[in-house]
Image (tube, rainbow, N blue to C red):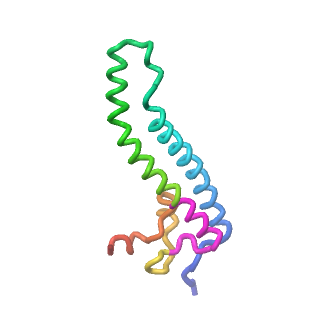
Amino acid sequence: MDTEKVRYSDAELQEFKELILSKLESAKKDYEELRAAITHSSSNGVEDTSPTFKVLEEGASSLSKEESGQLAQRQYKFIQSLEAALIRIENKTYGVCRETGKLIPKERLMLVPHATLSVEAKNKR
């Protein structure tokens, strides 16, 4: 009589927590770098290098300022999703599909640790 698990064990939750914390640290670092690229794009320290390089650098930075803004926004949302996942771990509701109520497979959570839907539920959308 193998009953289906309704939640992950505390040991498994701890494993997910460590994974999420490492992803969160990396995501915050990336976010800060993107923000720095946006706010410091006026001077990249190329004043004393060749004029050709300066023109290329300015072209690249003006193009990437908007892209950097979009990436920073996506990164911020990713950070929020990871932080929400940590709260679900504390509540012991982590890994439960918010539509089906079934456990999201561990393989999916290892790839997408902030997932709140099983593949089955996501495909129905």
Query: Which residue is at a point 67% across and 69% down the rendered structure image?
Result: 10
The segment highlighted magenta reads: 81-96
Query: Which residue is at a point 36% across and 42% down the rendered structure image?
Result: 67
| Snapshot quadrant of residue 117 | bottom left
Position of residue 109 relative to residue 44, above or below, is below
Position of residue 111 relative to residue 63, above or below, is below
**Image-based side of 91 in relation to 108, left or right:** right
Considering the image in quadrants, where does the C terminus appear? bottom left
Considering the image in quadrants, where does the N terminus appear? bottom right
Q: In the image, residue 5 lies at what x, y percent?
A: 57, 79
Residue ranking furthest to the bottom: 1
Query: Which residue is at a point 61% across and 67% down the rendered structure image?
Result: 87
Query: Which residue is at a point 34% across and 30% down the rendered structure image?
Result: 60
Q: Is residue 79 magenta?
A: no
Q: Is residue 87 magenta?
A: yes
Which secondary structure class fits the magenta region best?
A: helix
Q: In the image, residue 90 lies at what x, y percent?
A: 65, 69
Query: Which of the two residues, 101 or 35, is positioned nearer the viewer here?
Result: 35
